Image (cartoon, helix red, strand yellow):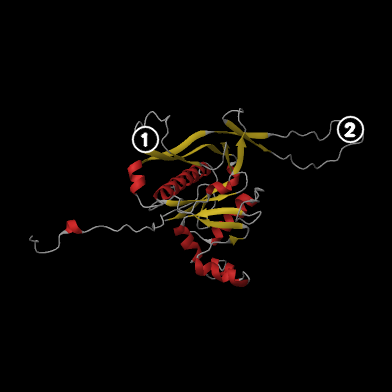
Amino acid sequence: MAFTIGLNTSLFTTYLIRKFIPALEKDLQMQRFTTKAMLPPGEGDKGRFNVFASPAAITTHIGEMSTTANEVVVTTTPTNCTIREYGQYIKMGRMAELAAVKGSRDEIADRLAYSAALTIDGLVYTRAKETTVEWYAGLSACLGAGPPSTLSVRDVISASLEILRAGSARGFSGVAGHPDDELACIVHPEPEADMVSEAATTSNALVWTEIVKYVPGATGQDKPIKGFMGSIYGTACYRSQNIGLTSVTATTGGESYDNIIFAEGGVGSVSLEDMDPVIYVNTPSSGDVGNPYRNFGTIAWHIMYGDALIDANRVVRLYSTK
């Protein structure tokens, strides 16, 4: 038997590493900061959120024996939220499942679970951007000023206090990992980099490094070193790569990052059965007439879900330059 000179690649094989490289995933924050409600079965496909307006304080006392003084009207603003079906699925051949590296099916299910979370996060983000309340980075006035500048700590404080807190909006309570009664500011990593690396000047000493410098203990030192985002004067800041770019009319020279600040009651979300998407791993069965050989299964996620902007005065679009 003769061998050709050189290496015969048909003799080679491939060893498949059995440890999967972690998939790239965005930091998803949006749905945590919605007002959630579950609809009971048999009660329709719409949820209604009602916002009550508080009557103004009175300035006159009630006259003796008066029966008509100081009557007020309490108004409500309803917001309907329609539930839709969302989902995705993938076919997985029986041969591929039997031959694939152990754990492949679980990894595929994890990818679909992330896709579900990404979908819900994007839906909430879309609703949040329906607000008409805007702030332009660079200490510009809200509603129409511009062009935006790079994001500053002062912008987060100004937008949070001058718009949301000044309008009596409240922070969130009972959200896992979120400080009680704090607003939530969600920014893209590039504006985050601008904010945390901002240099102090004689006219602006209130910068990120000055804020975390006075946080006691090791936590304060970890923030600028490890990239952990914390709170700025009652507003907790979070990073999300799911923040997009948008064209702002007053912007010159490009698009701006469309960051969001949430207050409680700004965006609502409703669902039937479960607020979290359900993952289904479906195996072939005798009733599966579309799979006569029973040679494939499916993995799917599914949810019956809806969301809506409840109150534009509780959500701010915070524009910052790219």
* Quarter that holds the N terminus: bottom left
Q: Which residue is located at x 56 percent, y 41 percent?
A: 275
Instruction: Please state the horizontal and vertical placement of residue 12, each as a whole percent of the image.
Output: 21, 59
Q: Amino acid at mark 2?
A: Ser
Label 1 neighbour load within 10 Å: few <14, some 14-19, many 20+: some
Depth check: give the residue in front, 67 or 49: 49
Label 2 neighbour load within 10 Å: few <14, some 14-19, many 20+: few
The CA distance from mark 1 to mark 2 is 82 Å
Q: Is residue 134 visible?
A: no
Q: Amino acid at mark 1?
A: Arg
Query: Mark 2 — residue?
Result: 66
Q: For numbered disc 2, what is the local secondary structure?
A: loop
Q: Which residue is located at x 42 percent, y 33 percent?
A: 285
Q: Is residue 59 left or right of residue 321?
A: right
Query: Mark 1 — residue?
Result: 294
Q: For numbered disc 1, what is the local secondary structure?
A: loop
Q: Vertical placement of 219 versus 44: above or below?
A: below
Q: Vertical placement of 159 versus 283: above or below?
A: below
Q: Is residue 234 visible?
A: yes
Closer mark to the observer between disc 1 and disc 2: 1
